[in-house]
Image: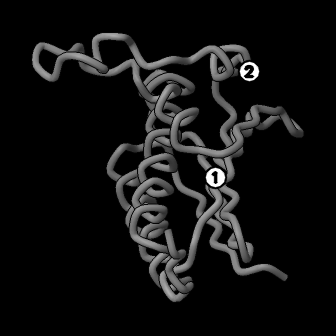
Amino acid sequence: MMPHLELRFESRLELVSLAGAAVRAMCEVRGVDPESASAIELLAVEIATNVVEHGYQGRSGEPVQLRITFGDEQVDVEVADTGEVLPAERVANAELPEILLHATEDLPEGGFGLALVRMLADTVEVTSKEGWNVLRFTRRLKRRDAPEEQA
């Protein structure tokens, strides 16, 4: 069995933060390089936050499941919920607004989560399984203990 971490928690933002800390700690234990660990934590937290805020419309007490599986060359992360369905085309069409490429002040708050997922993950898949909405992403990684590539 591949090393993995499974978390089940209720839809509360403070629990999303704890889940993010657990994901980060597991990445460190598995020797994931700091850049990949930060991206994986950010993506897991962003997706789980979207579940709480949009899938469950802010309702607490609803189920959220997070599973992170470590392979030799990539990490697979699944976030599952029973809230409103996220249409797969919203993920496929998500883009960072042009304003982000040029300005750093007066940015609107929010609305960038799905674009971040597309930008930082190597693959993204949205499915339904036995009444659960599942967003799965993979991120290729290099281990901290791997030799540096020569340029």
Could you tell me the amino acid type at mark 1?
Gln
Residue drawn at 47 percent across, 33 percent down: 116
Residue drawn at 15 percent across, 23 percent down: 104
Q: Which residue lies furthest to the right in this view?
A: 130
Viewer-side label of 2, 1: 2
Q: Position of residue 108 (x, y in %)?
A: 23, 13
Could you tell me the amino acid type at mark 2?
Ala
Q: Where is residue 149 in the image (x, y as percent from the top left)?
A: 54, 75
Residue 65, disc = 1
Q: Is mark 2 on a helix, strand or loop?
A: helix
| Residue bearing the label numbered 2 | 88
Label 1 near label 2: C-beta < 8 Å?
no
Q: Which of 130 and 107 is in front in this view?
A: 107
Residue 32 versus residue 116 in the image, above or below: below
Q: How far apart are marks 2 and 1 (CA)?
A: 19 Å
Q: Where is residue 82 in the image (x, y as percent from the top left)?
A: 69, 34
Residue drawn at 18 percent across, 17 percent down: 103
Query: How many labels were placed on the picture?
Result: 2
